[in-house]
Amino acid sequence: MQGKCSKQDEMRAMTERWTSELAPGATGWLGGTFGFTDDGQAIAVVRFESREAATANSQRPEQSAWWSEVEKLYDGPVEFHDCDRVMLLMDGGSDQAGFVQVVRGKLDDPDALESGLRTMETMLHDARPEILGATLAVEDDGTFIETVAFTDEAAAREGEKKEIPAPAAESMRQFNEMIHDVQFLDLHQPWFASKL
């Protein structure tokens, strides 16, 4: 979910309320990553075991009541992106991350990316130890949302400047050739929720 939100304290309180009050009854809920961008976009990347579980949750009366309150906190329309295809990099991230970058764009060949993901994962782990993990969620039309968890922002910025070894650099080059219309959304103070 993504939308402009100037009532950030209220939005955070409502997401934390969902975690404490509604999450226990949400079958198939796995967790979420939340935060605000510098230009006031509220970002919520919420994970479920399946589309069916997510749909069942949205149909609960308590979910509808909660959403009717949350929707009023946005300054305008809210974008929703539902993705059945999810790829994990290094276990998919960490609730200990001090900085999260959400990358949106279009992916030309999800199958090719997935086949090379394990190789890229191993090389990236060695070259960029500040990356704790990532999830890459892809819609049917190739729209993707990648959520990358870093130890902290300073380490992430330093890592961006490093020259990585040739094999890892080649994997990254191939990845970059598959994507376009890329947008980076930085969450400087992310927060998380996970199923216990």
Image (cartoon, rainbow, N blue to C red):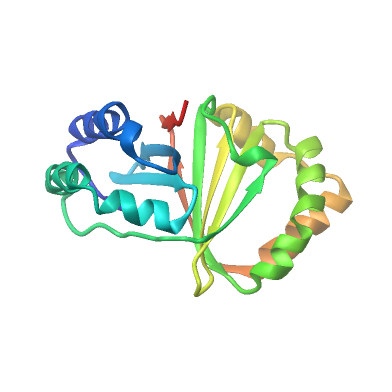
Residue 152, quarter of picture: top right
Q: Nearer the viewer, residue 98 or 164?
A: 98
At 45% across and 31% down in the image, what residue appears?
195
Q: Is residue 125 left or right of residue 15?
A: right
Q: Is residue 72 left or right of residue 186?
A: left
User: Image height check: is 73 above or below 82?
Assistant: above
Q: Is residue 115 left or right of residue 87?
A: right
Q: Is residue 79 left or right of residue 153?
A: left
User: Image height check: is 148 above or below 120?
Assistant: above
Q: Position of residue 167 (x, y in %)?
A: 87, 52
How many numbered marks have been drawn onto this rendered protein structure? 0
Is residue 1 something that shows in the picture?
A: no
Is residue 45 something that shows in the picture?
A: yes
Q: Nearer the viewer, residue 124 or 39?
A: 124
Q: Position of residue 171 (x, y in %)?
A: 79, 57
At 71% across and 61% down in the image, what residue appears?
114
In the picture as drawn, the residue positioned furthest to the right comes out as 166
Q: Nearer the viewer, residue 133 or 7?
A: 133
Q: Position of residue 22 (x, y in %)?
A: 27, 34
At 58% across and 48% down in the image, what residue appears?
135
Q: Position of residue 140 (x, y in %)?
A: 50, 72
